[in-house]
Amino acid sequence: MASSEEDGTVEEKENNNKKRTKSALATAWLTFYNIAMTAGWLVLAMAMMRFYIQKGTHKGLYRSIARTLKFFQTFALVEVGHCAIGIVRTSVIVTGVQVCSRIFMVWFVTNGIRQIQNEESVILFLVVWTVTEITRYSYYTFNLLNHLPYFIKWARYNFFIVLYPLGVIGELLTIYASLPFVRRSGMYSMRLPNKYNVSFDYYYCLIVIMLSYIPLFPQLYFHMLRQRRRVLHGEVIVEKDD
């Protein structure tokens, strides 16, 4: 009997050691990832400021940072993986929607339709994204290092109140500006007849995406407001069952 108890204790210790090792590795990776992403968006911020100071105009700004923007925004897909394997306790679906919507804006709207790259709305959402991501990744980094300055926490849960709606406005105006070009060119669309016997109209797809902001934006925005009350004011938020 004593021997089996000792065996059980040894197994428990081994399992605990494995869990601690996995936890340490996950923390190390997440710290590295968030530092890298903070640095990447800081590089973007400095590149945008330098361009505007030198040129005195926003025209051409997007093209000057496009490669860096596409790299770091696409690399954010890793965050969906973090949720999927459980090293970050966030919904895979929510994270996936947020990341993929950004990637869609970069690759299939702004990058794909050159005629809209100099629109003021593009600069609007770029500035919003940059400030938001520097704040967000800084918050995660300092939190993982157990040394979170209050200003970073305050910025994380206050900046979004203004930035989130401004970012949505910038994205919607950019998509709206792209519609005439998409309709004339028929880009990314498939017309019947074709060998696949499938029809797809990118113009109407963009309209549907714009309409999807109506139900999605309030849900995400009010979720952040609830998080803000919990983190900054210590309120206990009770989620209602459906």
Image (tube, rainbow, N blue to C red):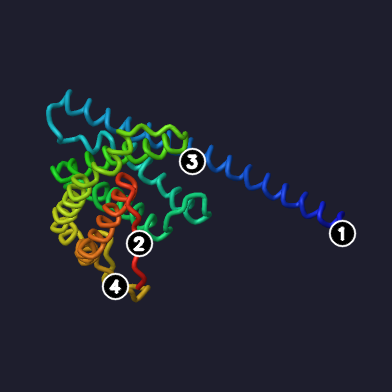
The quadrant where residue 155 appears: top left
Give the left or right position of residue 30, taking residue 107 as reference. right
Pointer 2 or 1: first along the chain: 1
Q: Position of residue 203 (x, y in %)?
A: 20, 63
Q: Tell me whether circle 3 and circle 2 mark residues in contact (CB < 8 Å).
A: no
Give the left or right position of residue 219, taking residue 14 as reference. left
Residue topped by disc 3: 30
Pointer 3 or 2: first along the chain: 3
Residue 89 numbered tag: none
Picture layout, residue 144 above or below residue 2 = above
239 or 108: nearer the viewer = 239
Residue 199 numbered tag: 4
Residue 1 numbered tag: 1
For image coordinates 21% across by 28% down, the residue present is 51
For image coordinates 20% across by 65% down, the residue present is 211
Q: Secondary structure at mark 3?
A: helix
Outermost residue toward the top in this view: 54
Q: Position of residue 84 (x, y in %)?
A: 49, 56
